Image (cartoon, rainbow, N blue to C red):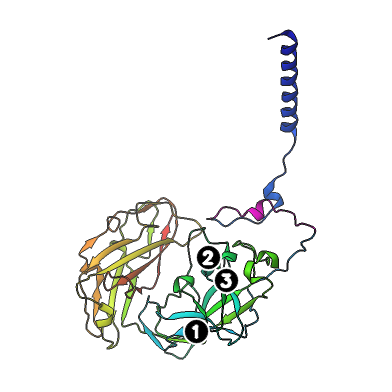
Amino acid sequence: MSRFTLIGFLALLAAVAAAVMVLLTRTAPDPVAEVPIPPPPTDPPPAVAVAPAPQPAERPAQPEVGLTKLPGHDDLKLVVDPPGPVRVYPGMSPGVEIKLVNTSRTKSHPVVRPGDGSEAGWCEPYTFLSATLDRPDGKMVELKREPYGRCGLYDGEWVKRVVTLKPGDSIPVHWYNLVPFDLQEEGTVTMRVHYRYAGRQSHKDVTKAEPAADRGGMGDVPPFEVVSDPIRVEVVRPLDLKLTLKRPAVKAGEEFTLPELLGLELTRRGDEPLGPVLNEPCYAGTVHLFVEVASDGSPDIEGGCIGNPAWMSLPRLEPAVGEMIDLFAQKKSLSENFNRPWKSRKAGVLRIFAQYSPNQRGGVPLFKSNPVELTITP
């Protein structure tokens, strides 16, 4: 290497070192301070929240489209077959078919097929259920959906699911496009199906509308909502499951097992035939015990089955009217974590509930117990 080449190389190296020092001495802005909205706990932070892109000058800011009630649609109708009444046991779906139908005789209408994420309202369209319960005592209450968990992946490219419904055409709205209610309480449920289109941007945390140019075949179709006629569902509960605590509390550091602390009783209510409940006689029943942390100060559990339900299998049970059966005394086999000792190093509260299935076939009734809370004292 010549003298001049070496001098040039050293000069270049010095310039690079100086540039690096300048960069290191600058104070980088805190992205969290700029964007105080936290991301969902189980999903990666949305790109629009971390680094929002500036709107082009020719694209004005879009109005927000919330989840308030939207205008109806003159020609689209949600048709339910059969319309009801439908009779179900706890834990079962009504099993009806739902279609979005174009009832016009002359006009075609673009619509969006429900997709993965529609049931959560993460993409277009938002499909959901509303329901009220008429209890046997005459009181009517609005049903709330159970906590719903799913993965963070969904089909955000809803513009690719736009189809044109010609007069008389329809698309299905499947039950997996809806978050169901856990129908456990006896009574008459009045249920409605909702199909809501708001033209929102393709992100589960964004409520702003897409510009018409980005809505594909939906174009400038304004937001609308279609609500079905009421579906009458009769919930029949011939079996009752009761969970009790033998001890209201244990001390931190004390070992215990679930059968030592819990009692679980199955009682036959009324004279409802058990044939449809038991289904086929060749399948035995099962009990699952679910344990959740109920307090802010999380108990530090060793062993146990938090996040992994304990289960036991049972023989075929046919209690007489009014008969009560101790399910723990009927066990045939247990999961490994059923009798495993538990111990908590910290104080706190555990919420426990049980679920009984008369047999192990899919789609059969699932009877849930009342929840109980176990206190762990210091």
Secondary structure, mark 1, is strand
Secondary structure, mark 2, is loop
Front one among 84 and 370: 84
Give the quadrant of residue 299. Answer: bottom left
Residue 211 visible at all: no
Q: Which residue is disc 2 drawn over?
A: 117
Secondary structure, mark 3, is loop
Considering only vertical position in the picture, is 103 above or below 373? below
Say left or right for 316 vs 151: left
Outermost residue toward the bottom? 138
Q: Which residue is disc 3 drawn over?
A: 125
Say left or right for 209 vs 92: right
Front one among 346 and 337: 337
- Residue 191 in the image, given as x and y percentages of width and height: 49, 83
Residue at x-position 62% and y-position 86%: 74
- Residue 256 in the image, given as x and y percentages of width and height: 32, 56
Residue at x-position 53% and y-position 84%: 168
Front one among 68 and 163: 163
Residue 358 visible at all: yes
For badge 2, the amino acid type reads Gly
Q: Are marks 3 and 1 in contact (CB under 8 Å)?
A: no
Magenta stretch holds residue 214: no
Q: Main secondary structure of the magenta part?
A: loop
For badge 3, the amino acid type reads Pro
Dot 3 or dot 2, earlier in sequence? 2
C-alpha gap between disc 3 and disc 1: 17 Å
Segment tinted magenta in the rendering: 43-57
Considering only vertical position in the picture, is 114 above or below 26? below
Considering only vertical position in the picture, is 372 above or below 321? above
Q: Nearer the viewer, mark 1 or mark 2?
A: 1
Q: Which residue is disc 1 drawn over?
A: 79
